[in-house]
Image (cartoon, grey):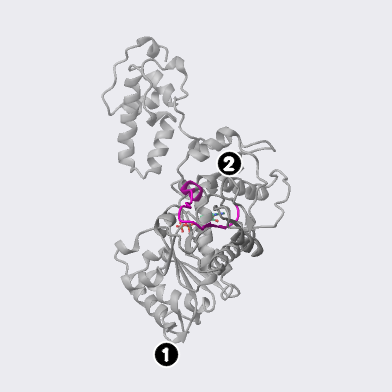
Amino acid sequence: MAWFRVPAPGRSSLRTRLTAAGLRDATGDVDLPADEPGVVVLSRAQDVVDPACLARRPGRVVVALAPGVDADPWSLLACGASDVVRLHGDDLRPVLDRLTRWQDVDVLVRAETARTGVVGVSQAWQLFVRDLVEVAHWSSAPVLLVGETGVGKEVAAHVVHRVDTRRRQHELVLLDCTTVVPTLAGSEFFGHEKGAFTGATTAHEGAFARADGGTLFLDEVGELPPVLQAALLRVVQEGTYQTVGGTRRRRTDFRLVAATNRDLRADGFRADLYHRLAAMTLRVPPLRERRDDVLPLFRHFLAEQGARVVGGPARRPAGGGPGRPRDDGPELSPEVADALCRHDWPGNVRELRQLAVRVAARHVGEGPVTPGDLPPEDRPRPAVPASPASVVPGDVPGPQWEHGLEGAVRDALRAGVGLKELKARTADLATRVALDVGGGTLAAARLLGVSRRALDYRTAAQDRPQPTDPSSDASS
Ligand SMILES: Nc1ncnc2c1ncn2[C@@H]1O[C@H](COP(=O)(O)OP(=O)(O)OP(=O)(O)O)[C@@H](O)[C@H]1O
């Protein structure tokens, strides 16, 4: 139930009218109520809104200024108010209309996320998904989704299609512009007639035709070649296209949702097309800006995997069928939860999902996910290397080799280091560790998790360190 606050005493008539409109009186609450939108009415010149309250509850509070009360609306918005309206006489409609809209948005968000298995509890995600649903449901404008790889742009495109009641009974056509082959691009977008070119043995329906009535999602739209940018602009402007080999223009009517992880304005993308696509630009926040989502998402993905793994633990059903957010995955040990929350997730939700797949494959039984369930390459680097102290004379060497030589090689390969460079780096690393431990190559080999022969081979090209502890080498 939406709420109101009228901080000034003696405004009982205002209270009575707001209560009669179905709002709950939250004037005495210590903090702004958390789950529902509401209104704070400033009815005297000396009334103020506590900015800290707004900051904790952004996106859901309208501040209403009674006649004669003045306040800077831009400062209130900057503090977290969603809107500032001036009341005229007894008319509460501007306030009530906004609250009703936000409640409708909430209902749609809850219904759609429950139906499609979209998970997100953080404030940043909630603000994003509410904006998305509002734009998608109450307008027909194109939507541009901007965000890093793996943040959920395609997931968001599905939400747009689902909540657009005029479009959802038609098709959502997904097209990844990075995979469009230039020579076939015309056919993929426009379709072709039978015999239009060699090999065109049948007519083919392109994306513009399939999306008619529905939604066209162009992923990585920044990769679209210039010639196709021009063609797309014409379709978007005129709502017509011509098939390859066709003789007449056909009509199409779709909602365009585009996604990019680059700044199209700075990247040689056609400015006129950009302005068409960017009518409603929404930024999908990266996972590191919504760390509250990490654990719910991880448990959701683990539960999905649990249901798929043959012989996986039989868990209670998710209570909603496939695609719904799941909270029936295994618990996480505190160390695992802590490690997940600390990670920066450069690959965003996709990276988290892939980790859940790897962890689900290692996890056994009904107990919590333990640190050992994380594959070695996914474990956080320990602050202090867990090397056997007995073989580490002298200083603790740097972090590059704390996963052993194999780990260092794997890290380098992942970073795209070439083979020649890799050879030089491993030789250098092996030599450095041997020097760090006082020149004893047997101790260094143990520390790096390889045989002494392998270490000798690696360091052969380098200046061989002189052992300072001959006894350690004598024992090999
Ligand atoms: N909020 C979410 N709830 C559940 N699953 C999600 C959510 N966000 C993303 N995912 C999952 O994470 C993976 C990556 O999401 P998606 O493909 O939508 O990202 P993207 O931003 O479109 O990536 P790219 O930029 O690489 O195309 C998918 O498996 C998707 O189902």
Q: Position of residue 218 (x, y in %)?
A: 45, 67
Circle 1: element type: loop
How far from the left and from the top, in percent, is residue 421? 30, 39
Query: Which portion, as a residue range, is magenta?
Result: 35-55
Seen from the viewer's position, the closer of residues 337 and 132 is 132
Q: Quadrant of residue 70?
A: bottom left
User: Is 349 situated left or right of 244 in this image?
Assistant: right
Could you tell me which residue is drawn at 56 percent across and 46 percent down?
Answer: 31
The Cα–Cα distance between marks 1 and 2, rounded to whole angstroms, is 56 Å
Q: Is residue 350 visible?
A: no
Give the residue furthest to the top: 471
Among the 4 quarters of the image, the one containing residue 185: bottom left
Up the image or down, 148 lies above or below 372; here it is: below
Q: Earlier in the sequence, mark 1 or mark 2?
A: 1
Amino acid on which disc 1 is placed: Thr
Towards the viewer: 27 or 160 = 27
For label 1, count other residues whose C-alpha is less than 10 Å away and answer few (under 14), some (14-19) or many (20+).
Answer: few
Is 76 displayed left or right of 296 in the figure?
A: left
- Quarter of the rendering occupied by the C terminus: top left
In the picture of the structure, the residue carrying the numbered disc 2 is 359
On residue 277, which mark appears?
Answer: none
State the residue lying farthest toward the bottom.
247
Direction from residue 282 to residue 17 in the image, left or right: right
Q: Which mark is residue 247?
A: 1
Q: Position of residue 272 (x, y in %)?
A: 33, 73
